[in-house]
Image (cartoon, rainbow, N blue to C red):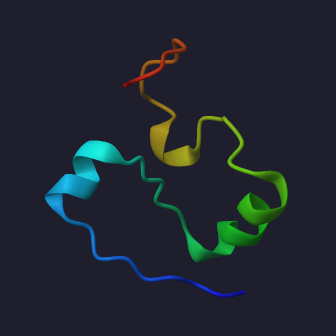
Amino acid sequence: MTFKKYNISLPNMQSNYFHFTSISNLESIRTNGLLPHIGKHAKYIEKTKKVFS
């Protein structure tokens, strides 16, 4: 597995989307894509579907 390191600046935060995850999840994300589900760290958040732009 190869990793790229990025320096995030304010313009990046305004024009890009980011997903932070554990290294142990990277192979699954690479194989299956980023699957939509509520993880253990978000189990108490609101559960209605929405899209942010």
For this view, does 50 lie left or right of residue 30?
Answer: left
Give the residue drawn at x 31%, y 45%.
Answer: 15
Which is more toward the observer, 9 or 47?
Answer: 9
18 over 2 or under it: above or below: above
User: Looking at the picture, how far across and down is residue 50, in whole percent?
Assistant: 49, 16
| Quarter-of-image position of residue 52 | top left
| Quarter-of-image position of residue 14 | top left
Q: How many marks?
A: 0
User: Looking at the picture, how far across and down is residue 9, in whole percent?
Assistant: 19, 65
Give the residue drawn at x 67%, y 69%.
Answer: 26
**The N terminus lies in which quarter of the figure?**
bottom right
User: Looking at the picture, how far across and down is residue 53, in whole percent?
Assistant: 37, 25
For this view, does 5 lie left or right of residue 4?
Answer: left
8 over 51 or under it: above or below: below
Which is more toward the observer, 10 or 38?
Answer: 10
Give the residue drawn at x 42%, y 47%.
Answer: 17
Give the residue drawn at x 55%, y 14%.
Answer: 49
8 over 11 or under it: above or below: below
Q: Which residue is at the far left?
A: 10
User: Looking at the picture, how far across and down is residue 38, in whole percent?
Assistant: 59, 35
For this view, does 17 lie left or right of residue 4?
Answer: left
For this view, does 41 lie left or right of residue 23?
Answer: left
Which is more toward the observer, 24 or 17?
Answer: 17
